Image (tube, helix red, strand yellow):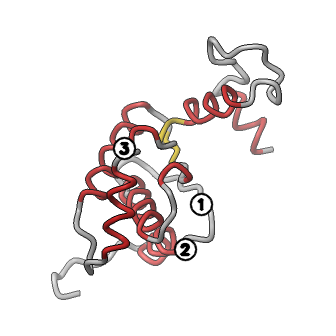
Amino acid sequence: DRTGVSPPVDHLERKRLVEDQLTSFAVGAGAGTGKTRVLVDRIIGLVDAGTELEKIVGITFTDKAAAELRERVREGLSRVPEPPAEDVAQNRKKALGSVDLSPLTTIHGFCRSLISTRPIEASLSSISSPPICCSTRSWPRRWNG
């Protein structure tokens, strides 16, 4: 490109993650590789297209990462859309008011929200403390074969 900086090797995959709004994705990569940026761009794109932020699930693994995700989404929603479009601006304004209520959270927070809204289906009488379903050591074996 004109800046002399080559795009990342995986730029086509990143583009698909942002633009393919009909497919759900799980993204795994090392620290500092741009996962949060791709997730934020995807969330903003979905909101711009009319999806309510409360219906978009963004899961991270730490509370710090979830807080950063919410803050970056808040910043993205605050920007003026390019090109300017009234419907997109209205979608962003509406979503901006619900960032802290949206399911942009940790895997534990997401599971807790599911269980707390459906305790009978989860065979729980209450959800005063998070259930322990499996250890982090057994999880990969248990779910990945």
Q: Quadrant of the C terminus?
A: top right
Q: Residues within 10 Å of mark 1 (few under 14, many from 20)?
A: few
Give the mark nearest the N terminus, 1 or 3: 1
Front position in the image: 63 or 49: 49
Q: Residues within 10 Å of mark 3 (few under 14, many from 20)?
A: many
Badge 1 marks a residue whose secondary structure is loop
Residue 121: % across, % down = 82, 30
Q: Is residue 26 above or below residue 99?
A: below
Q: Are marks 3 and 2 in contact (CB under 8 Å)?
A: no
Residue hosting label 2:
20
Residue hosting label 1:
25
At a point 63% along the width and 18% down the height, the residue shown is 130
Work out how far the residue at label 3 is from the one at label 2, CA to CA, in angstroms: 21 Å
In this view, the residue farthest toward the left is: 3
| Three-letter amino acid code at the position of disc 3 | Arg
Q: Viewed as shown, does residue 101 lie left or right of 109? A: left
At a point 22% along the width and 77% down the height, the residue shown is 5
Work out how far the residue at label 2 is from the one at label 1, CA to CA, in angstroms: 10 Å
Q: Residues within 10 Å of mark 2 (few under 14, many from 20)?
A: few
Work out how far the residue at label 1 is from the one at label 3, CA to CA, in angstroms: 19 Å
| Three-letter amino acid code at the position of disc 1 | Phe
